[in-house]
Amino acid sequence: MKPDFEFRVGAEETIASVIAAYDAEWELTQETLGTADWSALVVGGNGPVRAERLLTDVLQESARHLGHLDILRELIDGSTGE
């Protein structure tokens, strides 16, 4: 069974509450990664994968979305990076 998550910011959320939630998840991630067995197999969407491969996929996906946000910011204010 796949987890059912809503990736939406509710009307009651504030910038501070979203940042606090992100920071809390970051801390949990740091704790988890600090004790991870990188060669262990974990269940992924396409079957078992090594923990190190799963983390690589997460990093690539995060970078992709950050690139999308950069494009949106550029469309909003016209500023560009280096």
Image: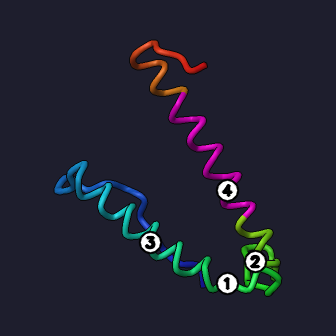
Image mark for residue 51:
2
Nearest to viewer (mark 3 / mark 2) = 3
Total count of labels: 4
Q: Residue at x 25, y 56 (%)?
A: 10
Badge 2 amino acid: Ala
Q: Residues within 10 Å of mark 3 (few under 14, many from 20)?
A: few
Frontmost residue, 46 versus 61: 61
Frontmost residue, 48 versus 36: 36
Q: Is residue 25 magenta?
A: no
Image mark for residue 59:
4
Q: Which residue is mark 3?
A: 27
**Helix, strand or loop at mark 4:** helix
Q: Residue at x 78, y 72 (%)?
A: 52
Q: Which residue is mark 1?
A: 36
Q: In the rendered view, tell whether residue 75 sits above or below residue 23.
A: above
Label 2 with label 1: CB-CB less than 8 Å: yes
Query: Is residue 8 found left or right of 44 in the rendered image?
Result: left
Q: Earlier in the sequence, mark 1 or mark 3?
A: 3
Q: Residue furthest left?
A: 12
Magenta span:
56-70
Badge 3 amino acid: Glu
Q: Residues within 10 Å of mark 4 (few under 14, many from 20)?
A: few
Q: Earlier in the sequence, mark 3 or mark 4?
A: 3
